[in-house]
């Protein structure tokens, strides 16, 4: 059983998310698999589909104990598990998958028609027309109705137009995003060029540092948000991460978070090594 479905229900996510994640709604592209396979990922990711050719994940990125709304992301496992925001609504995510299908098959096939009916996408012709101009380039998606507002970071033509809360990489004291994100959300080139006058959180620092000690110190002082962000940054073995999330769960005493912990532990096998 995919235990993530209980978490999705508790978070009042659209039913299409659960149906896609369970495999009840078939993806219109051969590479996407649901329920997602395990290639190793931090618990902030709640997978909907996996693609073993990358591998990559498409799923929900949610920071617990942090004042941020969840996003729909693509995670590139072979690129240090970097995550990028590709959608901010379930409708946008399904539109993106429709575009992936059109570009893969050079048009609209029967399985895409069936998928679109299930997820209530009614503008396949518009998506197809945009694909003829920009392919599946994320910047071209803004010309599709679903992406015209609440546009995800990957698709905004200008960073100044972005209204979400995914880390932008722009160091602006009015929006200290680095205090509310983990290292997987920030490309290495931004971390490498971090301004000397901007404090870098401990969980961003060299991943060879002992993240367990940093995590435990935050947990000891009751800083659940920072403990969580540490747990969802680089430098963990799966074994240590399993122990850490159980300790955080006991401290949090949160029924919704407990569902997430159960779901992640059910698939977080140590054969992935770490993240």
Image (cartoon, rainbow, N blue to C red):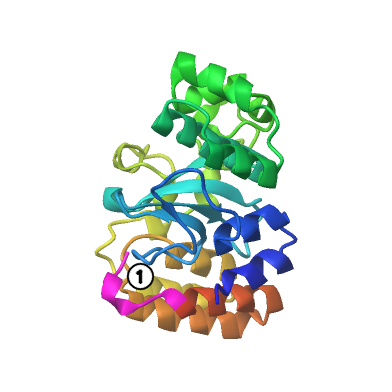
Task: Pick whichever, 262 or 173, lies toward us.
Answer: 262
Q: Quadrant of residue 176?
A: top right
In the image, is residue 213 above or below residue 132?
below
Task: Pick whichever, 235 or 5, lies toward us.
Answer: 5
User: Magenta span has 165?
Assistant: no
In the image, is residue 199 above or below residue 139?
below
Task: Kindly tell me whether residue 107 is visible in this rendering.
Answer: yes
Q: Local crowd at mark 1 within 10 Å, few (<14), some, or many (≥20)?
A: many
Image quarter (top left, top right, bottom left or bottom right) of the N terminus: bottom right
What residue occupies the far front of the structure in this picture?
110
Task: Pick whichever, 76 or 181, lies toward us.
Answer: 76
In the image, is residue 268 above or below residue 58?
below
Q: Give residue 39's position: percent from left, percent from top.
A: 34, 64
Q: Quadrant of residue 212?
A: bottom left
> Which stretch did the figure color magenta?
267-275
Q: Is residue 35 left or right of residue 161?
A: left
Image quarter (top left, top right, bottom left or bottom right) of the C terminus: bottom left
Q: Residue at x 59, y 36 (%)?
A: 95
Q: Give residue 135's position: percent from left, percent from top.
A: 44, 22
Mark 1, secondary structure of its residue: helix
Q: Residue at x 63, y 73 (%)?
A: 257
């Amino acid at each position: 059983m995919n235990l993530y479905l209980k978490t999705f229900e508790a978070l009042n996510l659209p039913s299409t998310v659960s149906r896609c994640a369970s495999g009840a709604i078939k993806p219109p592209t051969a590479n996407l698999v649901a329920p997602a396979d395990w290639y190793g990922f931090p618990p902030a990711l709640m997978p909907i589909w996996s693609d073993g050719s990358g591998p990559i994940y498409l799923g929900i990125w949610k920071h617990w104990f942090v004042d941020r709304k969840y996003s729909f992301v693509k995670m590139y496992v072979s690129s240090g598990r970097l995550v990028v925001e590709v959608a901010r609504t379930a409708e946008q995510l399904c539109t993106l998958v429709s575009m992936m299908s059109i570009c893969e098959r050079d048009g609209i096939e029967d399985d895409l028609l069936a998928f679109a009916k299930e997820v209530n996408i009614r503008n396949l012709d518009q998506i197809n027309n945009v694909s003829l101009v920009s392919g599946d380039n994320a910047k071209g998606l803004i010309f599709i109705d679903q992406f015209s507002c609440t546009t995800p970071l990957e698709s905004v033509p200008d960073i100044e137009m972005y209204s979400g809360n995914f880390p932008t990489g722009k160091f602006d004291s009015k929006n200290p995003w680095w205090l509310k994100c983990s290292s997987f959300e920030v490309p290495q080139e931004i971390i490498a060029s971090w301004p000397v006058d901007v404090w870098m959180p401990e969980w961003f620092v060299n991943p060879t540092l002992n993240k367990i000690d940093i995590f435990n110190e935050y947990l000891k002082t009751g800083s659940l948000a920072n403990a969580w962000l540490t747990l969802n940054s680089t430098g963990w073995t799966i074994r240590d991460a399993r122990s850490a999330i159980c300790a955080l769960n006991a401290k949090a005493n949160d029924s919704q978070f407990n569902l997430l912990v159960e779901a992640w532990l059910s698939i977080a096998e140590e054969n992935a090594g770490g993240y």
